[in-house]
Amino acid sequence: MSDNNRWGFTDRAEAKLKPDSEKSTTEHVGDKFKGKGDNVASSAQPQNEKSYPQKIGDTVTSNSNENDRSLLDKTKDTIGLGENKQ
């Protein structure tokens, strides 16, 4: 379970795994705003105040605001659904 004021794990996974070609403009815009908002919330919340599941979620999604791609993005790339199609 994600912390309060954070983008839920299942919602994030659904947004990441759904191909962009199947998303409406509203979904694209919503995902962008939710992602940016979650990045801000992640940066504003000290690590020692995050729940254990939230720490894991931030690590999996690279939401610790480091310049590394998330595991979900790397997986999408591997199966051909990401931005860096291989």
Image: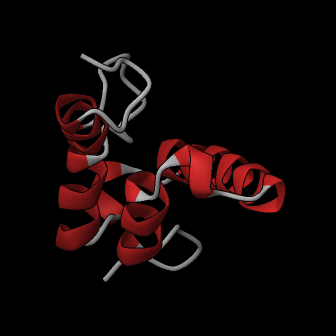
Which quarter of the picture shows residue 78? top left
Residue 42 position within the rendered picture, expressed as x and y whole percent measured from the top left = 48, 49
Which quarter of the picture shows residue 72? top left
Query: In the picture provided, is 65 more to the left or to the right than 39?
Result: left
Which residue is found at the position 37% from the left and 16% from the top?
67
- Look at the picture and state if 59 lies above or below 85: below
Residue 16 position within the rendered picture, expressed as x and y whole percent measured from the top left = 42, 53
The quadrant of the image that shows the C terminus is top left
Query: In the picture provided, is 36 more to the left or to the right than 49?
Result: right
Residue 61 position within the rendered picture, expressed as x and y whole percent measured from the top left = 31, 46
Query: In the picture provided, is 9 more to the left or to the right than 76?
Result: right
Which residue is found at the position 65% from the left and 44% from the top?
36
- Look at the picture and state if 77 lies above or below 26: above
Residue 33 position within the rendered picture, expressed as x and y whole percent measured from the top left = 74, 51
Query: In the picture provided, is 78 more to the left or to the right than 36?
Result: left
- Look at the picture and state if 54 lies above or below 71: below
Q: In terms of depth relative to the viewer, which is nearer, 62 or 14?
A: 14
Which residue is found at the position 65% from the left and 55% from the top?
31
Q: In terms of depth relative to the viewer, which is nearer, 35 or 22?
A: 22
The structure's colour scheme is secondary structure
Give the number of marks: 0
Q: In terms of depth relative to the viewer, which is nearer, 5 or 27?
A: 27
The quadrant of the image that shows the N terminus is bottom left
Which residue is found at the position 17% from the left and 69% from the top?
52
Which quarter of the picture shows residue 23? bottom right
